[in-house]
Amino acid sequence: MAFFCAPVAAEDTLQRGTCSTTIFRTMKPETMSYIGNPGALERWTRVWISVGGVVGFALLTAVGAQIAIPLPGTPVPMTLQTLFVLLAGVTLGPRLGTVSMAFYLLLGTAGYHVFALGNWGMATVFGSTGGYLIGFVLSQPVIGGLARLGPKQWRRVVAAVVVGNLIIFAAGLTWLSFWLGTGLAETLALGLWPFVPALVAKTLLAAGVGGMVLPSARRLFSA
């Protein structure tokens, strides 16, 4: 947008009016719609906040996946990514949380090295740890729904992250057992028991942080 108005005296109301008219005539229609309709600007602001939340938690999950410790005797590494998966559901809500984790999987399958230990591609999704990745997506509606259900905030958040972990590990262990052909005891030894201490710590941290951010999150992310 470009316009030019010559300086005029303060008392020259006619010229000032002409200048103002020129300015408004040079504005784009969408800009004029925001000036005349503050609700439209608010809606677009919320859209961009939602997009930022979706992309942000997908990237945080990718960063958490690189903070990983390979464990001997199991194909499943210990990572920080589940912390951000749990917080995504609590913060973004059921719909946006699901979109965020689906976007994370999309980044990995598209060739970006966002999975644990820098892995990527469909081979990882369908590999031994792919069930945990699918569990990230499946857990979001439950985490987001429980966190926003009822009046007792801290109890809701604790219940949400605990049930979310159950879904993630149920999906992960089921696929791990199928992929390796192991029985229940061996599957638990490979995919659950080594992670219990870190799992408890991440659950407590997610519940604490989630409980603090939930009031603000509910105002920003309504989905």
Image (cartoon, rainbow, N blue to C red):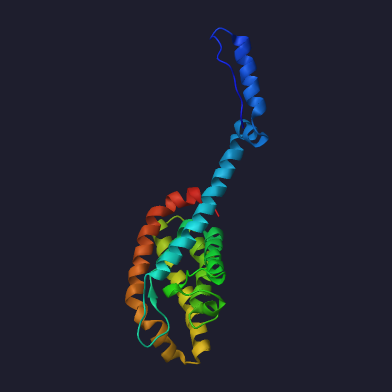
Location of residue 193 with respect to 46 vertically, above or below: below
Residue extending farthest to the top is 11
Classify the position of the C terminus by image quarter: bottom right
Query: For residue 16, which quarter of the picture?
Result: top right
| In the foreground, 198 or 116 | 116
Query: For residue 79, which quarter of the picture?
Result: bottom left
Query: Total label count?
Result: 0
Location of residue 173 with respect to 101 vertically, above or below: below
Residue 153 appears anywhere in the view: yes
From the top left corner, tell me how far across and down residue 194 is, in percent: 35, 82
Residue placed at 47% from the left, 92% from the top? Answer: 182
19 displayed left or right of 179: right
From the top left corner, tell me how far across and down residue 29 is, in percent: 67, 34
| In the foreground, 47 or 119 | 119
Classify the position of the N terminus by image quarter: top right
From the top left corner, tell me how far across and down residue 158 is, in percent: 40, 64
Location of residue 38 with respect to 152 vertically, above or below: above
From the top left corner, tell me how far across and down residue 88 is, in percent: 47, 61
Residue placed at 54% from the left, 53% from the top? Answer: 51
| In the foreground, 144 or 125 | 125
Residue 89 appears anywhere in the view: no
Location of residue 153 with respect to 139 vertically, above or below: above
